[in-house]
Structures are given as C-alpha cells and as structure tokens.
C-alpha cells in the first residue's frame, strides 16, 4: 500500500535523423512513501528521461514509449494531457537543477505558490497567500512575509531552490522528484537543501526520488539506490548495502572514482573509456568495453544482455550482470 510509483518494463526511444536513440530499456522500479530513492548514473544513463516520463513531461509526438508507469494506481503511459496535468500538481511534483526554469521571472514568488495552491483548492486569494507564506517559512526562508512579495531574481540561488521546493510541495504531493537539485549550489548550501528534503520527506511522509550523478549525495540522503547505465538498471538495493558492497562492476567503478577526503588529487581514478552511444550501444552488456571483469566471463558479456535478477543470497537486491556471484567476485577483485 505504500508504493506510490510502480514502473514496469519501461522503454523510451526517440527517433532522430541518425536513427533511433534508445534512452531507457526495460526499466522497473518502485518508489515508496517515506523513503528516498536515489537514481544514479552518468549523463545519458536515462535517469532524467525516465523521471520526466513519470510526470508525462515527454513530447508524445517525438517519443516512443512502452511499458507501464503507475502513479497512485493511475496509468501515466498514454494518459491524456488533462489527466497528466492533474497528476503533476496533486500527486507528484518535480524540483529541477535550475529553479528559474520553474519559477516565472515576472511574478512575485508568493503569488506563484498561492496560485498553484488555488488551482486545486477553492479558497480566497488571501487564504492562498497565507498558505504561500507558511510554505516559505517551512522551507526555511527567513522573513517569509517580505520574501513572498519579492521576485525570483531577488533571491539567492539557495533561496530560489527552497522556493521551488515550496512550490512543489504546496499541494502535498505523495511523490517529489528532485533532479540534481543541488548541482548548481555551493557545498554548504547543497548540504542545507539535502537536509531540507530529508526533513520534508519525514514531515509530509511523501516518497522522494533524488536523481543525481553524485554518490556522496546518495550516501548522505538515500534509503534505496538504483544505478543506471546506458538506459538500463544495472543494480538496485538498500543504499547502504549497495555502497558498502556493490554487486555490479559499474557501481564498483563509480565508487573507485569517488574522491576520498585523504586522496591525493593526482591519484584519483576515473572509469576508463567513455559512456556508450545510445544510437549504437555495444552489444551484450553495454558496460563490457569498460568492465574489468568481462574477460573473466567471456563471450556472454559481448553478446547477451544480462537478465535483471535477484542478487545471489540477497533477494532484496537486484543486479544485471553475467558474473555468477557478483558481490563476491567484486570483493575478491582486489580493486579496493
Ligand atoms: Fe562486466 Fe560482464 Fe557483468 Fe557486464 S555482464 S558488468 S561486462 S561482468
């Protein structure tokens, strides 16, 4: 009953002049109330495309989409625009990296939040304005009465991000999707915004999906973790366990490339090779050209897409890799 979002076998492709760009393939996951699910991957991994599709934000004329996205039991794939609009404002909301893309530059911040509230509640302007001020207060904006009467450009970057979170939460959505919400902010403000998202998740009891390329952010905030590579889920499980003992060579490589506080910058590793082209992805496991384990497994890595299966001995974790027992193989791999 606590599943807000149920995505099953989702595939998304975009026809382009150079061919079909397969952005997401066979993706399945769930988001639950009161939990933060982080979706991690490099750019081009499909994490943003998939989350935009959850809110029906793709252009149906330019997108081929199959599978199922159920938001509070309602099917999003193929739903008419009026229904998507209703879902977007009451059931699920999105916070973007750049708040200016969501806030209107020429309208006062308080008015924008009040109007979003009035679109779904038959209340007077004065009541909606009070609700807007209350929301600004709840996301930690000082002097919310005065701030409500200012324009977005009068806010700092961190304040704008808080204001957009207030706008996203004004109708108590059951799901909040935050796409790289802290990337444009400095480190101190990043930490404040992540704390705020955690507090609000507890207070409102909603589900949060945090899309990020930053594993340090995941370690701080996420309960569950889904790792994507070249449009496919490659590993999923409780964040602490996945980060502690990864079951996919790509997750391990991402962890290896994390700067540690004591690391000499000159010694930082990066994952050798480049992310694959989604127009012509490598056959078999798309990670095989960069995987240090592919020689051990041999031909299947180059010819067969690995199945999505429960990780051996850990039924609550899922992995997509031909290694028989990936956790043990990675542990024994001598990479750490
Ligand atoms: Fe590496 Fe093969 Fe596993 Fe892909 S399937 S991650 S190439 S071992």
Image (cartoon, helix red, strand yellow):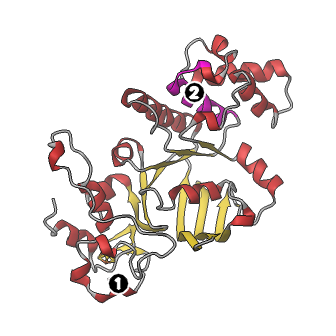
Return the residue nearer the eye: 63 or 148.
63
Q: Is residue 1 visible?
A: no
108 versus 321 height, above or below: above
Q: Would you say the beta carbon of the disc 1 residue lies within 8 angstroms of ligand 1?
A: yes
Q: Secondary structure at mark 2?
A: helix
211 to 248, vertically: above or below: above
* Disc on the earlier residue, 2 or 1: 2
**112 in relation to 97, above or below:** above
Task: Tell whether 130 sits left or right of 144.
Answer: right
Q: Is residue 156 magenta?
A: yes
Q: Residue at x 34, y 46 (%)?
A: 219
Magenta: main secondary structure equals helix
Labels 2 & 1 near each other (Cβ < 8 A) = no
Distance from disc 2 to disc 1, alpha carbons, whole Å, reads 47 Å
The magenta-colored residue range is 154-170
- Residue 236: x and y in percent read 41, 63
Magenta region includes residue 120: no
Q: Position of residue 181 (x, y in %)?
A: 50, 39
Ligand 1: quadrant of the figure:
bottom left
Question: For the residue carrying disc 2, how many other residues have a C-alpha within 10 Å: few (<14), some (14-19), or many (20+)?
Answer: many
Most distant residue in the front direction: 17
Q: Nearer the viewer, residue 154 or 115?
A: 154
The C terminus - image quarter: bottom left
Horizontally, residue 155 falls left or right of residue 128, namely: left
Q: Quadrant of residue 301?
A: bottom left
What number is the disc on residue 241? none
Q: Secondary structure at mark 1?
A: helix
Instruction: In the rendered view, tell whether residue 190 sits above or below residue 20.
Output: above
Residue under label 1, please give it: 302
Which residue, given by chain and number where applicable, does mark 2 sit on? 160
């Amino acid at each position: 009953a606590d599943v807000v979002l149920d995505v099953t076998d989702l595939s998304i492709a975009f026809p382009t002049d150079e061919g079909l760009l397969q952005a997401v393939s066979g993706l399945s996951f769930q988001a639950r109330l009161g939990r933060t699910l982080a979706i991690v991957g490099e750019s081009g991994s499909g994490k943003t495309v998939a989350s935009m599709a959850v809110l029906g934000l793709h252009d149906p004329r330019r997108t081929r989409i199959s599978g199922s996205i159920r938001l509070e039991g309602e099917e999003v794939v193929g739903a008419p625009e009026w229904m998507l609009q209703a879902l977007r404002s009451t059931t699920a909301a999105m916070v973007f990296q750049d708040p200016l893309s969501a806030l209107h530059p020429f309208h006062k911040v308080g008015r924008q939040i009040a109007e979003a509230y009035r679109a779904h509640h038959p209340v007077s302007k004065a009541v909606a304005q009070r609700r807007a001020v209350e929301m600004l207060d709840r996301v930690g904006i000082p002097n919310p009465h005065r701030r409500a009467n200012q324009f977005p450009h009068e806010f700092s970057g961190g304040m704008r991000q808080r204001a957009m979170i207030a706008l996203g939460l004004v109708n108590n959505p059951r799901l909040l999707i935050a796409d790289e919400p802290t990337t444009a902010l400095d480190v101190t403000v990043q930490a404040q915004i992540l704390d705020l998202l955690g507090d609000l998740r507890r207070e409102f009891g909603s589900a949060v999906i945090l899309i990020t390329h930053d594993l340090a952010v995941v370690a701080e905030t996420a309960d569950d973790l889904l790792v994507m590579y070249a449009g496919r889920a490659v590993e999923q499980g409780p964040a602490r366990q996945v980060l502690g003992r990864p079951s996919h060579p790509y997750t391990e490589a991402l962890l290896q490339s994390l700067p540690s506080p004591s690391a000499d910058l000159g010694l930082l590793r990066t994952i050798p090779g480049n992310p694959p082209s989604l127009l012509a992805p490598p056959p078999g496991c798309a990670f095989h050209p960069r995987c240090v384990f592919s020689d051990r497994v041999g031909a299947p890595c180059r010819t067969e897409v690995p199945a999505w299966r429960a990780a051996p001995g850990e039924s609550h974790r899922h992995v997509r890799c031909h290694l028989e027992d990936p956790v043990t193989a990675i542990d024994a791999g001598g990479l750490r």
